[in-house]
Amino acid sequence: MLTGRPAPRQPRKAIELLVVGALTIDRFPDGSAAAGGSVLHATRAAARARASITVVTAAGPEPEAQSALSELRRVAKAVVQEVPHTIVFEHDEEGGRRKLTLIGNVRLRPDVRQLHRLRPRAMLLAPVAGELDDAALGMIDEAVESRVRVAALQGWLRHRRADGRVTPAELGDLPVDVLAALRNCDAVVVSHEDLGRAEGYPTPGAALEVRRWLPGPAVFVTWGGAGHVRADPGREPAMFRRRDTIEGVPTIGAGDAFAAGIAIQLAKGTSLAAAGRAAAGAVERWLARQPGAVWRPLER
């Protein structure tokens, strides 16, 4: 029997993780190309953790980018800003070191009306090349309420020269408004390579370097397979050093997966130390399942 009453609203499924950042297309010396970007790698990691995910991203019409969007939409809700061209990174080597050239420019300007409907438990800010500028961060800050906010710093630490070559940037060189937004995060994640550190094992100096500019958030500096160093606000850094590591498999996206794990764990109320261990363990299990993975003891 029809009563004329409106049907009760179905409760929305809670968003466990919101990931924000632009997609990229990576071009390699052998002529191959593939979609990339921290947003893609972090979403894959969150999907492996069976989290409910929403993605805010920007992408162009290229086949690689559209394929990545299809993948994202299979595991997440996607808020997509259409741009004329996806950001491109050309990969090469010079003197045994990776050389990156950046082509294109994107400023993320998502639809604020869609952002206002989002209430994620955790948000991961994961730019690749400065697309999250002060204006974008201001829009997100005004529109999105999240229990936990984590930032992966890599995309802010890339400086593009006039010829497109990517060189490391210093945290102190970031715009004042960007630094202010990052200081309001609960945690920030960065790799030792992005900081220009050459030590083979986690060292406290790396985290102290970040905390000099970002004294408020907890700091995680990843060291590849060697572990990570954590600096809680107001405390001396703590080091998590591994005795062995996984080799023989690509580690692209491992840092982004770690950052996603940190955000998910902190939203659950996990302590910073436990969040670091859980995120590192999830990345380790993922790498260990890859064909060709082998364990090697680390020299001390």
Image (tube, rainbow, N blue to C red):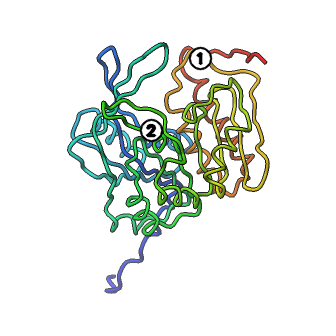
Which residue has dot 1 on it? 293
Q: In percent of the image, x 38 and y 53: which residue is there?
A: 56
Residue 140 disc label: none
Q: Amino acid at mark 2?
A: Arg
Q: In percent of the image, x 31 and y 52: which residue is there?
A: 80
The reply, left or right, for residue 69 in relation to residue 248 is left
- Looking at the image, residue 180 lies above or below residue 127: below
User: Residue 106 appears at what percent x and percent y?
Assistant: 30, 47
Which residue has dot 2 on it? 158
Marks 1, 2: nearer the viewer: 2
> Spatial distance from mark 1 to mark 2, Cα to Cα?
30 Å
User: Residue 197 appears at what percent x and percent y?
Assistant: 62, 30
Which of the 4 image quadrants contains residue 8? bottom left
- Looking at the image, residue 10 lies above or below residue 34: below
State the residue lying farthest toward the bottom.
4
Q: Amino acid at mark 1?
A: Ala
